[in-house]
């Protein structure tokens, strides 16, 4: 057996992962951290927060959780990814219903859930799961053209040649 045939799961993942998309995501995370580094001291001073890098620290924690989640999902197989998308859709719909029931009102709109020290907007979390689960059922994104079905040849047409 060749060395490539008995490689580790991490090596198999590295061969199959979209490295361009992974690099783009890492670049966006780095750019966001850089912007937080620049803006955090001024925002902390304006809001009267003692730690000048509080917002940078929070951003770094959330970015590392997001990066771990992206890497974990990219290691899933197609079937497991579809199942995870359906579970994420169900969870996000539950969060949307929860927002209607106990959501915090901000500027006259009830769009936020406050869970402990974390406030989130469930509609933002529901978008990716809706897209992923709709593709599972054969729906294509807006504007995407489907490939035309290839015509079938009848047995008579191929035997007459």
Image (cartoon, rainbow, N blue to C red):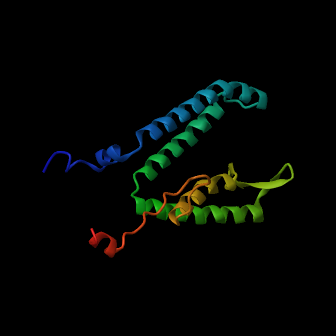
* Residue at 30% from the left image edge and 50% from the top image edge: 9
Residue placed farthest to the bottom in the image?
Answer: 156
Quadrant (top left, top right, bottom left, bottom right) of the C terminus: bottom left
Q: Nearer the viewer, residue 155 or 132?
A: 155
Residue placed farthest to the front in the image?
Answer: 160
Seen in the picture, residue 97 relative to 39 is either above or below; the reply is below
Seen in the picture, residue 109 relative to 83 is either above or below; the reply is above
* Residue at 39% from the left image edge and 51% from the top image edge: 75
Q: Nearer the viewer, residue 47 or 50?
A: 47
**Residue 43 coordinates in the image, percent (x, y):** 73, 29
The tally of labels here is 0
Residue placed farthest to the right in the image?
Answer: 108
Determine whether, in the image, residue 147 is placed left or right of residue 160.
right
Determine whether, in the image, residue 154 is placed left or right of residue 49.
left
Determine whether, in the image, residue 122 is placed left or right of residue 135.
right
* Residue at 41% from the left image edge and 39% from the top image edge: 19
In terms of image quadrants, where is residue 141?
Answer: bottom right
Determine whether, in the image, residue 101 is placed left or right of residue 85.
right
Q: Nearer the viewer, residue 71 or 41?
A: 71
**Residue 10 coordinates in the image, percent (x, y):** 32, 46
**Residue 51 coordinates in the image, percent (x, y):** 67, 30
Residue placed farthest to the left in the image?
Answer: 1
**Residue 120 coordinates in the image, percent (x, y):** 68, 51
């Amino acid at each position: 057996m060749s060395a490539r045939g008995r490689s580790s799961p991490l090596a198999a993942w590295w061969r199959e992962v979209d490295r361009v998309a992974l690099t783009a995501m890492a670049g966006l995370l780095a750019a966001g951290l850089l912007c937080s580094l620049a803006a955090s001291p001024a925002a902390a001073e304006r809001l009267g927060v003692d730690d000048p890098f509080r917002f940078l620290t929070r951003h770094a924690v959330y970015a590392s959780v997001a990066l771990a989640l992206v890497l974990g999902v990219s290691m899933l197989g197609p079937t497991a990814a579809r199942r995870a998308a359906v579970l994420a859709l169900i969870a996000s719909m539950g969060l949307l219903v929860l927002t209607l029931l106990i959501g915090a009102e901000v500027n006259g709109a009830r769009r936020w859930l406050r869970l402990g020290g974390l406030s989130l907007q469930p509609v933002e979390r529901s978008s990716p799961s809706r897209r992923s689960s709709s593709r599972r059922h054969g729906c294509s994104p807006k504007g995407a053209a489907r490939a035309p079905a290839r015509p079938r040849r009848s047995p008579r047409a191929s035997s007459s040649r």
